[in-house]
Image (spheres, rainbow, N blue to C red):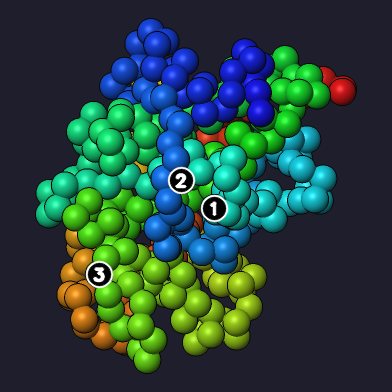
Amino acid sequence: MRNKAGLNLETSFKASDQADMGQSELCWTANVFVFLLLLPGILGWGREGHYAVCKIAEGYLTEDALSMVRELLPASAEGDLAAVCSWADELRENHDYHWSSVLHFVDTPDFFCNYNCSRDCHDSHRHKGRCVTAAIYNYTMQLESAYKEITSEVRYNLTEALMFLSHFIGDVHQPLHVGFVGDLGGNLIKVGWYQRSTNLHHVWDTMIIESALKRFYHSNLMLMIQAIQSNISDEWHNEVSAWRNCTGNHTACPNPYASESISLACKYAYKNATPGSTLEDSYFLTRLPVVEKRLAQSGIRLASTLNRIFASEVKVAEV
């Protein structure tokens, strides 16, 4: 697996650690090669959540970005970005991709309720740059810098970069993917979800969405996506331009997204969810609007990031 510079994708993080591009404050240093055992539930929104994020994003891509995305997608996706938005989670059983497990999240100090990239973006061995925000910067950089010189070899890597980026932008919007280090983003907080035993992280990854689908959307994910799209056009219309913004003319800006997530984790995810408690309607009905808005923001911001990456007139070379 090699990029245009002839580096493995995981060691390409190391190259960015050495680059002086005046963006050290972005915390996209990183030398990511890690062999970690994956914790249950640590890898992002469930399949439905990631599908929703990418399906929403598809509706806001520019013509150039949509063309490039379709060009880079694997044939199995049949031109649908949403079809591969869970790909990065499906790698959990693949030995060759264990290094990527740490890139799905970033942990923060217990009860601080804020995100500081230089303090927080590291793995359990305190190697800097091994977290979801660094991964977003890294794959954005790969796509932005390499797509103008595509060969058949690079094309494969840009396909992976696109799928990783699309997934990780979803992940950083899940509040407990920027949760507390002491409970591993809620994974160690055992709770009940109605009659089921689970953990708090899994509640936010999948169970709120699953319960909403059954109760309000006739178990039809497209109905849920359409409802979110309607809210983007109506209820959240005045907020969308702010969601799209990326300060300092940067192509990607995940640090503010991480700051939002830990704030929401403290205000909503951890609140009234003590170990051993059973979460039911009072929790579900007040947290569902948070989840749906985060899915909306993820989709808008994924589209905006891809639009900035592929803003050039340059088209993919025939291979």
The reply to whether discs 1 and 2 touch (Cβ–Cβ < 8 Å) is yes
Residue kind at label 3, given as amino acid type: Ile
Residue 152 place in picture, x, y as percent: 80, 24
3 or 1: tag closer to the N-terminus: 1
Q: Nearer the viewer, residue 247 or 272?
A: 272
The residue lying at 44 percent from left, 40 percent from top is: 35
Q: Nearer the viewer, residue 254 or 242?
A: 254
Residue kind at label 1, given as amino acid type: Arg
Secondary structure type for disc 2: helix
In this figure, which residue is indicated by the disc labeled 2? 101
Residue kind at label 2, given as amino acid type: Ser
Rendered view: 286 above or below 228: below
Is residue 110 visible to the viewer in this orientation of the structure? yes
Q: Quadrant of the N terminus?
A: top right
The residue lying at 80 percent from left, 50 percent from top is: 76
Residue 105 place in picture, x, y as percent: 37, 47
Name the side, left or right, on which 23 lies relative to 308: left
**Spatial CA span between label 1 and label 2:** 7 Å
Rendered view: 300 above or below 160: below
Name the side, left or right, on which 54 lies relative to 41: right
In this figure, which residue is indicated by the disc labeled 1? 92
**Spatial CA span between label 2 and label 3:** 20 Å
